[in-house]
């Protein structure tokens, strides 16, 4: 009679500490060890639906981070904003923009395109792809301008469906000045090939992406990685790698895989407070998010379809934060989910003050505790 294989158990707290270390959140990475571009690559991109989240994500993870560093990389086209993983906008290195879009295509953009198929009745998608490429490679096009040009070709078609189709069918980059620190600009699009001056790379092998995912988010299950990237049927590359991976199980008995030399700190390792932006990938990249999000606070980080910014206390989701800025004043309001000890409260306030010093130029900065006003 066959016996069920058992693996060493990693407690939820041990999983939390391991993931925080991979995410550069247990200790900020020293600059001698990790550059800004290196962090963007290690983290396999940063959620960038809004302009500022990538900057706040790096401020939480890199020692002595200056927002102008990421902005300079974007201006020099060493990093860029484009739709990849889960068909959401990410900030990636140029190399990852060119390689991860083919990898993510079936699990994100193609899936999103199917949601709009009813609005694309009668549209020749090959023609739409060719026309959109011609338009945005002639010069970067604002979304409104691209939409109007496509509507001339297919009048009466749902306008949003046309621009979504263009974004899903082509690897479109949001060009600068959109995304630069301290600048503003409407969304304008061109192809990744045009922006970087080179063709897309072949899609990375699934085993390569398994290794990268585990390095940034492990230990993790097959379903965890599938949640992260939107792809299915990833059991096979995990099994191919099994001889070179180590295996564990969580407290629920789910099998977890990991790189043998990846850090797995002791569960008792102190975890300092960290302030994270909305959409941070730490909260979106596992099927079971309890390693960071306690069950009793699930669902409290969203209002409608808009996420709040969150902070970590003792490594776990501790509450929400909001920043109100004017020319000379920056006020951070911190709303804990649970009562903090005096020491925890002081640590959260100190971290908040450090974030304000890094991310704002206001002369007057204040961290306050309380509930958000409507």
Image: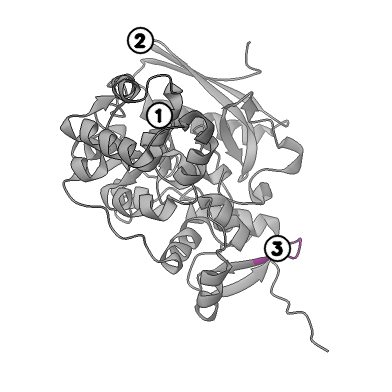
Q: Residues within 10 Å of mark 2 (few under 14, many from 20)?
A: few
Q: Earlier in the sequence, mark 3 or mark 2?
A: 3
SS class of the residue under badge 3? Answer: loop
Horizontal and vertical percent position of residue 95: 27, 53
Left or right position of 209 against 94: right
User: What residue lies at 29% left-to-right and 51% top-to-bottom?
Assistant: 98
- The verdict on residue 32 being magenta is no
User: Which mark identifies residue 162?
Assistant: 1
Q: Give the answer, above or below, for where 168 lies relative to 346.
A: below
Task: Tell me the mark number nearer the camera, choosing from 3 and 1.
Answer: 1
* Badge 3 vs badge 1, beta-carbon distance below 8 Å: no
SS class of the residue under badge 1? Answer: helix
Which residues lie in the magenta part?
Answer: 251-255
User: What residue lies at 60% left-to-right and 56% top-to-bottom?
Assistant: 224
Task: Tell me the residue that label 2 is attached to.
Answer: 327
Q: Residues within 10 Å of mark 3 (few under 14, many from 20)?
A: many
Q: Give the answer, above or below, for where 226 lies relative to 112.
A: below
Query: How far is disc 3 from disc 1 in space, using C-alphas?
Result: 44 Å
Question: In the current view of this chain or complex, which residue is farthest to the right?
Answer: 1
Type of secondary structure dominating the magenta stretch: loop
Q: Give the answer, above or below, for where 147 lies relative to 289.
A: above
Task: Tell me the mark number nearer the camera, choosing from 2 and 1.
Answer: 1
> In front: 89, or 260?
89
* Badge 2 vs badge 1, beta-carbon distance below 8 Å: no
User: Which mark identifies residue 250?
Assistant: 3
Which quarter of the rendering shows the N terminus?
bottom right
């Amino acid at each position: 009679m066959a016996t069920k294989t058992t693996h060493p158990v990693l407690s939820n707290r041990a999983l939390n500490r391991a993931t925080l270390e991979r995410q550069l959140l247990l200790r900020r990475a020293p600059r001698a060890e990790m550059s800004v571009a290196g962090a963007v690559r290690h983290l396999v991109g940063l959620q960038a639906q809004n302009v500022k989240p990538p900057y706040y994500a790096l401020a939480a993870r890199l020692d002595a981070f200056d927002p102008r560093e990421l902005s300079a990389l974007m201006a020099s086209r060493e990093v860029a904003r484009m739709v990849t993983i889960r068909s959401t906008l990410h900030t990636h290195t140029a190399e990852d923009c060119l390689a991860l879009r083919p990898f993510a295509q079936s699990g994100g953009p193609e899936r999103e395109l199917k949601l709009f198929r009813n609005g694309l009745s009668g549209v020749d998608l090959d023609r739409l792809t060719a026309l959109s490429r011609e338009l945005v490679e002639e010069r970067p096009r604002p979304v409104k301008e691209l939409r109007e040009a496509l509507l001339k070709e297919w009048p009466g078609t749902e306008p949003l469906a046309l621009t979504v189709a263009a974004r899903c069918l082509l690897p479109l980059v949001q060009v600068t000045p959109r995304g630069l620190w301290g600048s503003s600009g409407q969304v304008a699009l061109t192809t990744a090939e045009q922006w970087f001056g080179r063709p897309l790379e072949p899609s990375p092998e699934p085993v390569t992406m398994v290794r990268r995912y585990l390095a940034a988010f492990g230990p993790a299950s097959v379903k965890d990685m599938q949640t992260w990237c939107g792809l299915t049927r990833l059991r096979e590359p995990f099994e191919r790698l099994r001889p070179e991976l180590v295996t564990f199980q969580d407290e629920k008995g789910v099998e977890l895989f990991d790189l043998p030399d990846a850090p797995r700190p002791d569960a008792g390792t102190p975890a300092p407070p960290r302030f994270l932006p909305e959409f941070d990938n730490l909260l979106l990249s596992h099927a079971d998010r309890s390693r960071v999000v306690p069950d009793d606070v699930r669902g409290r980080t969203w209002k409608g379809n808009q996420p709040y910014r969150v902070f970590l206390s003792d490594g776990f989701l501790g509450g929400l934060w909001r920043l109100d800025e004017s020319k000379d004043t920056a006020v951070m309001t911190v709303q804990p989910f649970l009562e903090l000890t005096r020491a925890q409260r002081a640590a959260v306030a100190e971290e908040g003050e450090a974030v304000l010093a890094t991310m704002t130029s206001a002369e007057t900065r204040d961290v306050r505790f309380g509930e958000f006003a409507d």
